């Protein structure tokens, strides 16, 4: 019976092959969500090895951060863009959990990130959440938490205002668009905590900066940032 199920699974995969969301290649036996070639060869940043990396520099003089990280470089038309498109708009939530696990494996060896008490995803407005059905940053956060032994708190930082899309806006316009957008519902739960704030893609950092400004109003809070990708 087990052999028969195996033959049936092979037959179904021939008719309806699972495709890697990054490169479009058919997944073979023992490959899960992302093909082996992409797992090894997507453009990793290795920012966890660089305290003074280019993403961290975006926040200098704006908010006080302990460390900043992105798993991949994001280039228009590249494989990471395809991966993120499937994750955010095709409903493949498992991508976020997998990437969170992969990022967490790197970060658990870092003496700053592995001290995070709480992981807080950048929130979606309730109207956007209803439309999409899930927050991609929460999926990523859940995967990270499994490796970092931290708790995901996704109901405290809230987006009070639905903002217009950030695409094609300048850095100043992006920051202006994010003013007074976020609020912390239960600040007392974050006092003296090391918070890892996570998002999917960082470009100018304006969204993360706006979140950070609110979080850092809380006494004793230390802030680190992790994202799936950095858009160059």
Image (cartoon, rainbow, N blue to C red):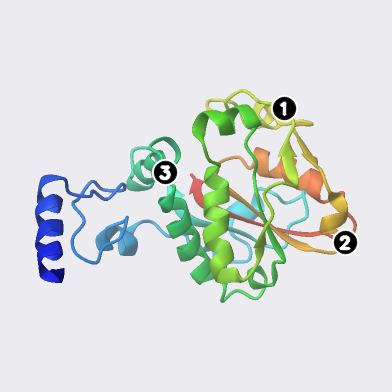
The residue most toward the front is 1
Q: How packed is label 1: few (under 14 Cα within 10 Å), some, or many (20 or more)?
A: some
Q: Quadrant of residue 65 in the image?
A: bottom right
Please say if 131 is above or below 9.
above
Which mark, by number, is residue 6?
none
The residue drawn where x is 76% and y is 30% is: 179
Looking at the picture, tell me which residue is in the foreground, 43 or 161.
161
Confirm whether residue 53 shows in the render: yes
Judging from the image, what secondary structure is the residue with disc 2 in? loop
Nearest the camera: 125 or 84?
125
Q: Quick one: label 1 or label 2, which is nearer the N terminus?
A: 1
Q: Dividing the image into 4 quarters, which one contains the N terminus? A: bottom left
Q: Which mark is residue 220?
A: 2
**Helix, strand or loop under label 1:** loop
Crowdedness near tag 3: few (<14), some (14–19) or many (≥20) residues, C-alpha within 10 Å: some
**Mark positioned earlier in the residue sequence (1 or 3):** 3
Q: Which mark is residue 87?
A: 3
Q: Residues within 10 Å of mark 2 (few under 14, many from 20)?
A: few
- Work out how far the residue at label 1 is from the one at label 3, CA to CA, in angstroms: 24 Å
Residue 123 in the figure: left or right of residue 95: right
Cβ atoms at labels 1 and 3 below 8 Å apart: no
Spatial CA span between label 3 and label 2 = 35 Å
In front: mark 1 or mark 2? 1
Q: Picture coordinates of residue 161 (x, y %)? A: 72, 27
Front-most of 206 and 119? Answer: 119
Instruction: Please provide percent x and percent y for residue 132.
Output: 50, 33
Tell me the tag on residue 161.
1
Q: Secondary structure at mark 3?
A: helix
In the image, residue 170 lies at what x, y percent? 61, 28
């Amino acid at each position: 019976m087990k052999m028969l199920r195996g033959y049936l699974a092979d037959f179904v995969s021939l008719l309806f092959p699972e495709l890697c969301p990054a490169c479009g290649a058919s997944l073979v036996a023992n490959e899960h969500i992302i093909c082996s070639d992409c797992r090894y060869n997507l453009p990793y940043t290795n920012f966890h090895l660089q305290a003074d990396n280019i993403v961290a520099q975006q926040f200098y003089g704006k908010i006080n951060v302990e460390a900043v990280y992105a798993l991949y470089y994001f280039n228009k038309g590249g494989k990471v863009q395809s991966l993120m498109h499937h994750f955010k708009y095709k409903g493949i939530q498992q991508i976020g959990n997998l990437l969170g696990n992969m990022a967490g494996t790197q970060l658990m060896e870092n003496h700053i990130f592995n001290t995070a008490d709480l992981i807080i995803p950048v929130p979606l407005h309730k109207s956007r959440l209803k439309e999409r059905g899930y927050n991609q940053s929460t999926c990523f956060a859940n995967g990270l938490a499994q490796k970092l032994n931290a708790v995901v708190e996704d109901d405290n930082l809230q987006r009070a205002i639905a903002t217009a899309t950030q695409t094609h806006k300048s850095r100043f316009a992006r920051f202006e668009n994010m003013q007074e957008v976020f609020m912390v519902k239960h600040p007392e739960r974050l006092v003296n905590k090391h918070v890892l704030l996570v998002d999917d893609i960082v470009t100018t950092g304006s969204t993360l900066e706006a979140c950070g400004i609110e979080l850092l109003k809380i006494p004793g809070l230390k802030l680190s940032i992790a994202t799936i990708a950095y858009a160059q």
